[in-house]
Amino acid sequence: MAAVTVTEELHRRAVVADAHNDLLIAVTARPPRRWAGYFRERWLPQLRDGGVDLQVLPVFIDDRFRPEGALRETLRMIECAHTLAEGNADEVALCLDGDDIDAALGSGRIALVLALESAPGLDASVELIPTLHRLGVRIASLAHWGRTALADGSGEDATGSRLTGAGVEALAEMERLGILFDVSHLGASGVAHVLELATRPVMATHSSARALLDHHRNLTDAQLRGIAATGGTVCVNVLGEFIAADQADRTVDRVAGHIAYIADLIGLDHVGLGPDFIQEVAADTMPPCCEDRDYTEMLVPGLEGPRGLPLVTEALLRRGFPEAAVAKVLGGNVLELFRKELGRPA
């Protein structure tokens, strides 16, 4: 039997939290009768091999469902999350608060947390946020690349738009209920607006450092400091196009560089992982004839999916991070935030 390396031992021992994996898109592409089985066959082995203990499941609605079908597809994806959790109750648990997460981890199961990404199904109907909370949603953002009734995404930064009136109400309602506000994808002026108004911690589920790559999806130093000042966490995205401009520079070490930069800037206690693994989701749901992007060009070699997460542990150790610090980045910080805030009413 091969000896266990320091990297392997640390990765197994640490709580590994992934704050953003769009796997629900792939699962809901199957007939409902296949949801639980498909997750068990296709995704559960990857999560286990990658050491994932805590998985955030974003509900992202493709453009083809917007606007008329957005709420219906939102509910369908939420139902999918419940179905796959119930059908794999020996391996995973859908969690509503930190106590649920601790119970899942204590029993050796993967803790799942539901999130909304841009919430197009809401439109401006803030009164539906409690409904979604009752269905298990515990994290939410208000925009993706473009404009919604609540806010503008970072692709619309030129507008200089802050939250709409409904967006301000949505933030307050989320804080009341204990739904964590996610600033990833939000436009720059919207992020500033949220940081002015927030009374509870906010997080970025999948964003990297703009100082290292000037892309509108990355966060500036001021934004990073603002998130940390709320007590929140920034979870680093590993998609290559947000890590380095040149494909040759899109490496695991460069990902570790973003983590190190953010940790140095705002403190080690405010950094986590939000990989945004997209290759398999895209390949699984979009026929080759109809896909207009080559996702392989966007990726960091080795980080195409959850199985690559131990490479991040190795890269951080190679950079001189103490083992305790690596454990915080891998998931300790996200777990601590969720224990304090998730599902806890104001």
Image (cartoon, rainbow, N blue to C red):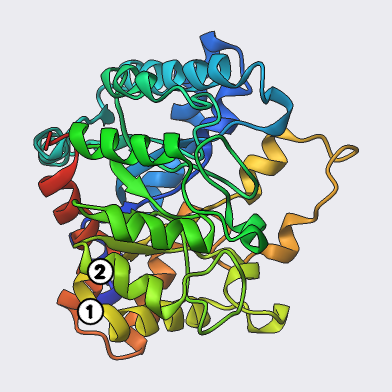
Q: Secondary structure at mark 1?
A: loop
Task: Determine whether, in the image, residue 322 is placed left or right of residue 121.
Answer: left
Q: In this orientation, which residue lies closer to the viewer: 338 or 291?
A: 338
Q: Nearer the viewer, residue 250 or 44?
A: 250
Nearer-N-terminus badge (2/1) = 2
Q: Quadrant of the N terminus?
A: bottom left
Residue 305 in the image: x percent, y percent? 53, 54
Query: Where is residue 56 drawn, in percent x and y?
Result: 36, 42
* Residue 264, quarter of the rendered image: bottom left
> Which residue sits furthest right?
289
Q: Residue placed at 50% from the left, 38% from the top?
A: 150
- Residue at 31 percent across and 35 percent down: it is 112
Pick the residue in front: 225 or 24: 225
Is the Cβ of the residue at disc 2 closer than 8 Å to that at disc 1?
yes
Residue bearing the label numbered 2: 228
Question: With respect to residue 283, does 121 lie above or below?
Answer: above
The amino acid pointed to by label 2 is: Ala
Q: Residues within 10 Å of mark 2 (few under 14, many from 20)?
A: many
Q: Where is residue 163 drawn, in percent x and y? A: 46, 47
The type of residue carrying mark 1 is Gly
Which residue corresponds to mark 1?
267
Instruction: Tell me: residue 178, above or below residue 64.
Output: below
Residue farthest to the top? 33
Residue 237, relative to residue 169: is it above or below? below
Q: Residue at x 25, y 69 (%)?
A: 228
Image coordinates of residue 23 in percent, x first then y, are 52, 37
